[in-house]
Amino acid sequence: MRRRPGAALTAVLTAALTAAAVLTLPAPAAAAPGPSVAPQWWFDSWDVHSLWAAGADGRGITVAVIDSGVQADIPELRGKVLPGADFIGNGSDGRTDYDRSEFSHGTAMASLIAASRGFAGIEGLAPAVKILPVAVPLVNVIRRGEPPEDSTSKAIRSAADHGAQIISMSLGGPRFEARHSTPCPQDIQDAVLHALGKGALVVAASGNSADSGSPVEEPGVCLGVLSVGAVNAQLAVTDFSSRHRYLGVTAPGRDIATLTREPGSAFAESGTSHATALTSAALALIWSKHPRESARQILSRLLATVTDRGPKGRDTQYGFGVINPAAAIAAGPAVTTGPNPVLDAAAPLLALRRARATPPSPVAVASRPDAALGEYRIGARPAELGPSVYLPAAGSAVSGVLSLVLLIAAVRRRRRRRATAALSA
């Protein structure tokens, strides 16, 4: 997972990926694509080629990759990368990868999602999707200009406004209670809500910091974001994958082969970045097979069909479980109406946004001096979130939504009382 730079990040930068190895071996003869040193085992586990043959190949879906940019001219991605945006300040349209390292982070993630079979046999999980690249000033990117301070939130909004149904962010920055008043910065939470309001799904890495206490990471901690951890080929959570109470799901993230911006070059590395990209691609597969379903229904399919590992139900290591797109695609429509804790967590804030966007009645305006919910900030303060998400033993982060529900109910009751008083006068 790649870090975002910033005052709170540069001093606590940790290694984004583990176990790097340059790949030079040809693809094996086995069914799973990829090189023999790092076969793409999930193709066999999920019977991916059969899913493609049945029409679940990502067709009609746009996945935004918010990262270091995507090298659109490598053969395996040619024709699949749309003009995007650059919030690094380099003046590109996102179709250039500005990662200083050979690994080429943004291109690597895009290759896991959409690459046609090429060097070392590497294939993307959803080869028919379109990639919308949005470049942001991550640590270790080439910068020729000055990025905006709120580049991540602008990137999320841009992706949503330009038609991305899935927004994939293999990045994050730690948040600490001693330094930050909220687990999720308000501008990023607002941008996530904007994307959800547009009907998009937002996916982010949980972090690679299990060995350093698993600090809270944004944007993964933000309400409404699907936070993703990493497992190996045996579906065991990796040693580096951050443990969080808000973790959503886990996906393949150990020894994953990816392409770079240089044609004929690839790496095998590990990280929750890879798991995030594969989860985004899995959602694209599901959506392409069920194109009439809403974002909520697609995510409900994914959550209802995970392989539960560890303690029963949601836990800090696996979230709800390991993704299984084949099971999600095959499941009946009943799963689409099941619980969706990820999106339910953001529902009260989305309701507040709608309340702000709807002009209040003349009676309601006359009955109260404050603007509509003006004293309440969308970026909820810790007291409004309930038990602190920063503390491992403090209870579920999602449980804080109850506080928001109560707050909304109290505000509405207050408004009704004031309106009634105005009418009786």
Image (cartoon, rainbow, N blue to C red):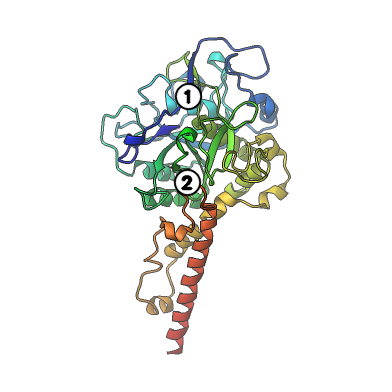
On the image, the x and y values in percent for residue 140 come to: 34, 27
Q: Identify the residue at image location x=60%, y=45%.
A: 299
Give the amino acid at mark 1: Thr
Residue 59 seen in the current view:
no
Q: Nearer the viewer, mark 1 or mark 2?
A: 1
Q: Quadrant of the N terminus?
A: top left
Label 1 crowd bin: few (<14), some (14–19), many (20+), radius 10 Å: some
Residue that lies at the very extreme toward the bottom in this rendered image: 425
Q: Secondary structure at mark 2?
A: loop
On the image, the x and y values in percent for residue 322 come to: 63, 36
Residue that lies at the very extreme toward the left in this rendered image: 145
Q: Nearer the viewer, residue 286 or 221?
A: 221
On the image, the x and y values in percent for residue 6 come to: 32, 39
Residue 261: image quadrant is top left
On the image, the x and y values in percent for residue 128 come to: 57, 30
Quickly name the residue at label 2.
221
Give the amino acid at mark 2: Val
Cα separation between marks 1 and 2: 23 Å
Residue 174 seen in the current view:
yes
Quickly name the residue at label 1.
18
Q: Quadrant of the C terminus?
A: bottom left
Dot 1 or dot 2: first in sequence order is: 1
Q: Identify the residue at image location x=65%, y=44%.
A: 301
Q: Is residue 302 left or right of residue 68?
A: right
Q: Nearer the viewer, residue 269 or 191?
A: 269
Q: Nearer the viewer, residue 138 or 131?
A: 138
Q: Secondary structure at mark 1?
A: strand
